[in-house]
Image: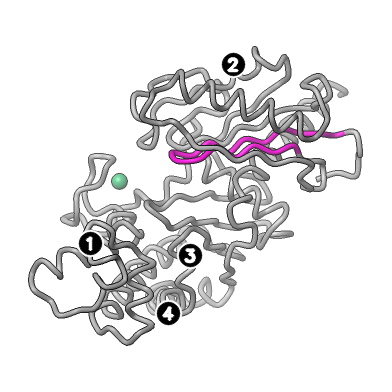
Amino acid sequence: MSDNPDIKILGIDLGGTKILTAVTNAQGKMLSRDHSITPAKEGQQAVVKSILESMSRALDQAHMVAADLTAIGVGAPGLSNPETGILFTSPNLPGWRDVPLRDIIEKQLGKKAFLINDANAAALGELYFGAGRGARNFIYITVSTGIGGGIIIDGKLYTGSTGTAGELGHMVIDDEGPQCNCGNKGCWETLASGTALAREARRRIKEGAATSIPKYADGDLEKINAEAIHEAAQAGDKLASELIAQSAYYLGVGLANLINIFNPEVIVIGGGLSNIGDMLLKPAFNEAGRRAFKQAYQAVRFARAELGRNSGVLGAAAYAFEKIKVKEATSHS
Ligand SMILES: [Zn+2]
């Protein structure tokens, strides 16, 4: 982002299950890193308290106080408005509605803070420090329990008119498809996420399909996840391979839509499901190739995310840095 050694940013990646907080410099190097569990079920106040505690541990670890910080970047799940710093609602944080998360953090630390959607943050992380480095037009997708994403147009994160752009997982693929948490039917994440893969496996097993998948989930249908299905497929299980092929198909359909709409240089894929690797991604890319405009498909490069669990926290920091830079540039002119 910059060579200025004085810049120190506190990045926070708030997830439904974990909170990751880090102090980074302007090159994306982490000077400290704190990892804790999100007490999501205990409600909003408990989560906010955990965030504040995690921030102070990250500062301690870096031998810093809040006054040493340049800015704070917060990535949070769900719908938020980066301009107002309000988190409207989040499927991963039950009970949260219109929470002024940015202001709460600013007040506590006395430093400028910026709020952004977690998947958008991860997109920025990959853009600045990961597989999207140097790209001008780039799409990031994370495929895990749901599908999230971020859209970079001409080197900038596209957030839309009220800040909620990039909800790639809620692009409708099948108008009569499975019910989605958002209230709609057949969204991409109801067909191509890790949750969808596990759900299909359970459904087929209950119908009586012959498979070794439960063996990889301690014999417990509820414990079946993408990893168990992948392991079964690697061991030659026919149903497991079939289910992964089906996920790949739907993943490819969505990718084709993104390629046709955005004509990106790079599509970076992260999230737990992408760990299945070639068995999932190769047929997905091929399906996209069968459907997308040839010229646009030939122009796109597919890459696996490089930053793993750190993409969100680094991206939240990068977002804060970008915002500060813009503010400085306008105040000097
Ligand atoms: Zn949806």
Q: Residues within 10 Å of mark 1 (few under 14, many from 20)?
A: few
Q: Nearer the viewer, mark 2 or mark 1?
A: 1
- SS for tag 3? helix
User: According to the image, label 2 marks what residue?
Assistant: 103
Pointer 2 or 3: first along the chain: 2
Measured from the top left, where is residue 109 in percent x and y?
A: 70, 17
Can you name the residue that lies furthest to the bottom here?
Answer: 236
- SS for tag 1? loop
Pointer 4 or 2: first along the chain: 2
Measured from the top left, where is residue 294 in percent x and y?
A: 48, 77
User: According to the image, label 3 marks what residue?
Assistant: 259
Residue at image coords 34%, 29%:
94
Pointer 3 or 1: first along the chain: 1
- SS for tag 2? helix
Residues under labels 2 and 3: Cα distance? 37 Å
Q: Is residue 316 left or right of residue 111?
A: left
User: According to the image, label 1 marks what residue?
Assistant: 220
